Amino acid sequence: MRRFAAPLRDAPLNKPVVVAEETLTEPVVVSDVATVAAKSNAKSNAKPNAKPGAGPAYIVLAGISVSHFLNDTMQSLIASVYPILKDTYALDFAQIGMITLAFQFTASLLQPVVGHYTDKKAQPYSLAIGMASTFFGLLLLAVAQQYLVILVAAALVGLGSAVFHPESARIARLASGGRYGFAQSVFQLGGSFGTSMGPVLAALIVVPFGQGSIAWFSSIAFLAILILWRIGRWYAPQITAKKVAPLHAHPDGPSSRRVAIALLVLVALLFSKQLYVSSLSSYYIFYLIDRFGVSTQAAQMYLFVFLAANAVGAFLGGPLGDRFGRKIVIWISILGALPFTLALPYVGLVGSAVLSVFIGLIISSTTSSIIVFAQELVPHRFGMISGVFFGVAFGIGGLGAAVLGKLADHTSIEFVYQVCSYLPAIGLLAVFLPKLPRPAR
């Protein structure tokens, strides 16, 4: 009996073990992204999940964030060249809004479908394949001479986005090492910074050299394809075909009814945030030109300032949610922007620039917390939930841009911003969000 004493003393059977829900669904961690940890403990590669102390897989997070940066840089070019398309083809604001709708509605419609499918059967190389759609969409946009062709090109770029976001969000969570808000913020940082670069690149390249110069950005799509193919090679060995045991609800977790209500509230909160951001990203250039008489290039730089602040806020929101709780971050980030959005339509050019920085920093910090909160509400449907929320964000942006464009044609851009200034007040709905039990670390 003495030879069994040590194993029994070391075994964890003499105390309860709490297993996080993600442990039952996440595949194994590959050693090539955590070489040092693997060398010190080679046996950990065969276990179902990384140890809590293993930390995030920074190489993978960096790669997926850079890919998000490249993806959203190309996407933001569409909105950034609106003034060129408007002047060249004599488009009205409603037609400009339809271009945004063609791009974002495609992404909105397909993202939940892609996420639902990859929940059942992961597709590690789908990211690279989807980026090829963006590649061809940019080439088509560069040579388009008809309005219908422009719409098709925008839809192809949207298709690439639909494939990219759900699976890449899953990879970011898989590489998080348990720091889900941090990982989602790193992922969001790439996208937000990429979105902010579109106006700068448009001002420096597309405006001087014309519509055809958009084709040059297809090289960015090709680089993204190479990075995503490499990430696919990292992801493929981690996919497990084994069926997992059914997961029982956490005893302290919300009921299914409260989960459904919470998801609807999160969608409404994302609606208020994304529609306001869409109003600035799609029409801020025209607002500055019409009200203050600045040049197109100067207006694009002002838009860059707002989008850059948006990127910083998106990065800060996730770690703050990990530290203080996602619900409090959601409260502060949406309602906190309300005083600044209400003041924006009534200040001068410098005041508009300053307020846009505060608005971008505050309102964008909610994105990571909303997405991670939703993922924790429905832990077995990470891909579908990511697709739904990314898709809702794109869909709301596209539909909102079309509606706001129509409203601007019948009233004015200034009136549109007066109406949109009240959108953050929807953040009051956060009172209906449940308190989630903290996952085991």
Image: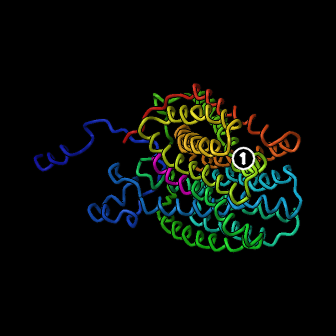
Q: Mark 1 is on which residue type?
A: Gly
User: Residue 264 appears at what percent x and percent y?
Assistant: 65, 33
Residue drawn 55% across the image and 40% down it:
362
Looking at the image, can residue 260 be seen?
A: no
On screen, 99 above or below 344? below
On screen, 378 above or below 290? above
User: Residue 232 appears at what percent x and percent y?
Assistant: 53, 66
- Describe the element under mark 1 as helix, strand or loop: helix
User: Residue 320 appears at what percent x and percent y?
Assistant: 45, 40
Magenta segment, which residues? Answer: 180-190
Q: Is 267 left, or right, of 20 in this rendering?
A: right
Q: Nearer the viewer, residue 290 or 233?
A: 290
Q: Residues within 10 Å of mark 1 (few under 14, many from 20)?
A: many
The quarter holding residue 76 reads bottom right
Q: Which residue is mark 1?
A: 397
On screen, 269 above or below 48? above
Residue reaching furthest to the left: 2
User: Residue 269 appears at what percent x and percent y?
Assistant: 63, 35
On screen, 91 above or below 206? above
Residue drawn 65% across the image and 65% down it:
201
